Image (cartoon, rainbow, N blue to C red):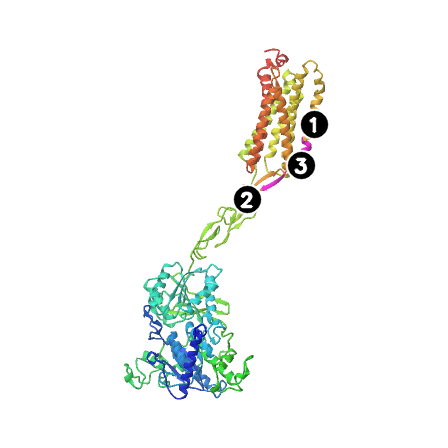
Amino acid sequence: MSAEVFPPCLLLTLLTWVVCEVATGLYAEGKCVYLDRAQQLDDVGLSQDGDVVIGALFNVYILPATLDLSFTTEPYLQPCSDFQESPVQWAQAVVFAVEEINRNPFLLPGVRLGYHVMDSCARHPYSMRAAFSMISAGDRTCETTRPVKLIIGDASSTQCIILSKTLSPLYIPMISYLASCACLSNRHEYPNFFRTIPSDVYQARTMAQMARRFGWTWVGAVVADNDYGLLAVQVFQEETKGTEICLAFVRTLLREQLAKDVDHAASAVQASSARVILVFAWYVDVEAFLTELVHRNVTGRQFLASEIWSTSSRLLSNPQLYTIAQGTLGVAIRRAPIPGFKEHLHQLRPSRYPRDTLLRVLWEKTFGCSPLQNSSQSNLPPCTGTESLEQVENSVTDVSNLRVTYNVYLAVYAAAHALHSLLACTMPNGSDSSMTSGCSSPDKITPEQLLEHLKMVNFTTQLGEKFYFQDGEIPAVYDLVNWQRGPGGTLNYVPIGRLEGSQLIINDSAVSWPGSSNKIPVSVCTNQCPPGTRKAIKKGLPVCCFDCLPCAEGEFSNVTGSSKCHRCPPEFWSNSVRTACVPREVEYLSFSENLGITLTTVAVSGSMTTAAVAVVFVYHRQTPIVKANNSELSFLLLLSLKLCFLCSLVFIGQPSPWSCRMQQAAFGISFVLCISCILVKTIVVLVAFHSARPGSASLMKWFGPGQQRGSVLLFTCIQVIICTVWLSFSPPVPHHNLGIQESKVILECMVGSVAGFSLVLGYIGLLAAVCFLLAFFARKLPDNFNEAKFITFSMLIFCAVWISFVPAYISSPGKYSVTVEIFAILASSFGLLICIFAPKCYIILLRPENNTKKFLMGKTK
């Protein structure tokens, strides 16, 4: 049959079922059969028969840490020879719990509970073989027990994943005491799996919370190359996603090539700037890793320990690690006492448990003698029988911190309560009552029935705690420990906090940090950006590696580690170090600055010069040159020029609503009055010369002094009307211009209505153009003193100034646009004053002999 029709996993399940059924049948016939005896694992364990038997798997023997199997074709089948003491205590927790339950008249009354404990060697081939052996009721010595209905174990998450998938079709429940991989929480894939240890999700979450709490954003990771380590670091990354915490490196440790992996991991730690190292691995592998760091003289690292090695007595008692491991922060399985367990350990004797091969090996390792009656089977001398563990201090007899041992103890009691519920006919809600056919008996118990009742386990422990499974899990409770130096220089772990659910409680003052300074280590890829800068992620690097860029102008950051800079409010600007916003400097053309003083001086000088000319004209008002061409217009022109000079002062100073209105009105009306006077004077010149022709004597009657004054008034009133309408509907107003100079607020007058401003300038330009044309036509009239000639030059200067003013005004920023307008006013005013009145003053003051009517009429040279 093809694999598509019959999947490989189903083939494995069927093969397992056949093996179990054949072995069980042979056991019932009193036979002892082995499959492939030559490759079979030496049976290390202990057993006791009973009405119902539970199995247990412990990794008593493991591969030596110094063994390099990287070039071995079948590394997982290599023999295990490194004996561990802690699993012996775990195995004794099974023995003690079973004996305690058998003595309890209220739990499983009338039913004798048995156990079958085997070594799994921390390798899945051995773990599978041991599990098959237990469910098929066989062992190496042919001293059989009943098939187990439930397995407590294994320690490794990888072994549990394989065993659960294999045993799930047979409905055989598993209760692990140490497999914490988050993947095992999937009830769809692992419906027969339970555990008395919280998922790694909570452990990794706790480490992520500690990293955030102490500001560690650059963390290295050294993890076991299996589901336990790889999925733990994956959960850590998921918990820190969206934060500034990232992994500097991830290195794995595989037992089969431990020497090579330890070298790579130590090199990564040595080369990395990360000072905090997350370690999820078996304590034997961690010992090899830390020892390598000691050999390389690597110090100043803060280790975050997983529960598997955070309380390891083997590491704590290793003098080589006293310096490098000091300050380690660890997540530890919650500690709980087991009443009477200490006395049980002290009473252990190989003679009391003759089938306990673990106890025999422990005796040989501890006392250096063989407890076997036939001493020829051992190279050690025979024991006297007086040996006792009561005075021995090792991992087996230490009951001061029962953690994994208590998990094993709870697992046995969970199995016992499930059996009690099943045998007492207490059906869980929602299950099929046809499964029990009344009350079950020990011989008729099926794993499927036990699995259903195990889901509903709920009892109170001897410590008064409620125990129950929620989707195969127990509530998350962890202790937080810190490795600190004792009085003699040795290392001890000290409780510093606790995790209950998602609540993390740490006593920071109780923590001892690595190094002599006893300060919280700093582990960052890049130091936090100071105020005034922002983070800029480096391309191709993790988010915690960044550059610190100064904030742009107008932006600020006032906190450390800011990821962005903030814009200042419109009326504010960033200070020089970009840490705060300060009010923008208000800029306008003031009287106190150099430019304002200069313009004021020029304007006042022009006004005084105009006044001086007026004084000269008043003093010589009876002379021909003053009386010529209507002296009234001359005095009115001098008055308007004086107003033109003075109106420029209105443009200087802080703009206000009234000053903005006065600027344009004074400018427009003053210049129209000035140009109107010049225009009328030009018309008078033309009329005067044309009236001298035969038949044109009546022209001057129609344009006498009254008409001249009326014309000036008319021309000026038009500008007054334009200004009045403009100022009434859309007057100029003060405006805070924020877009010219970003660090300054330019206080200026907005023209309001562009059309109004254009009409004012256009009307002035129209009058000036007409005046220029008339003066140009009258420039060659036959007089020694032809005023039209000087008016032509003055209008030429006036038009040139104001034509140049328009582009200069538009392109000038801020207060300089005001300066350009003032300059145009002053330049054009000086042009008019000099071109029109300078020649007259020259004659009056320097050539008085020419100040005669004959000279002016051109009758004398």
Q: Secondary structure at mark 1?
A: helix
- Residue on which the image places disc 2: 584
Q: Is residue 644 above or below residue 657?
A: above
The CA span between labels 1 and 3 is: 20 Å
Q: Secondary structure at mark 2?
A: loop
Q: Is residue 49 left or right of residue 606?
A: left
Measure the alpha-carbon separation of dots 3 and 2.
30 Å
Q: Residue at x 67, y 14 (%)?
A: 693
- Residue 687 locus on image (x, y percent): 67, 19
Marked residue nearer the N-terminal end (1 or 3): 1
Quadrant for the C terminus in the image: top right
Q: Which mark is residue 714?
A: 1
Pointer 1 or 2: first along the chain: 2
Q: Which of these two is toward me, 532 or 490?
A: 532
Magenta highlight on residue 770: no
Q: Which residue is mark 3?
A: 727
- Which is more foreground, mark 1 or mark 2? 1
Q: Nearer the viewer, residue 146 or 581?
A: 146
Residue 640 seen in this snapshot: no
Furthest residue toward front: 1
The mark nearer the N terminus, 3 or 2, is: 2
Relative vertical location of residue 353 with respect to residue 581 in this rendering, above or below = below
Q: Are marks 1 and 2 in contact (CB under 8 Å)?
A: no
Picture coordinates of residue 525 (x, y %)?
42, 57
| Quarter of the image where one finds residue 44 | bottom left
621 relative position to 13: left or right: right
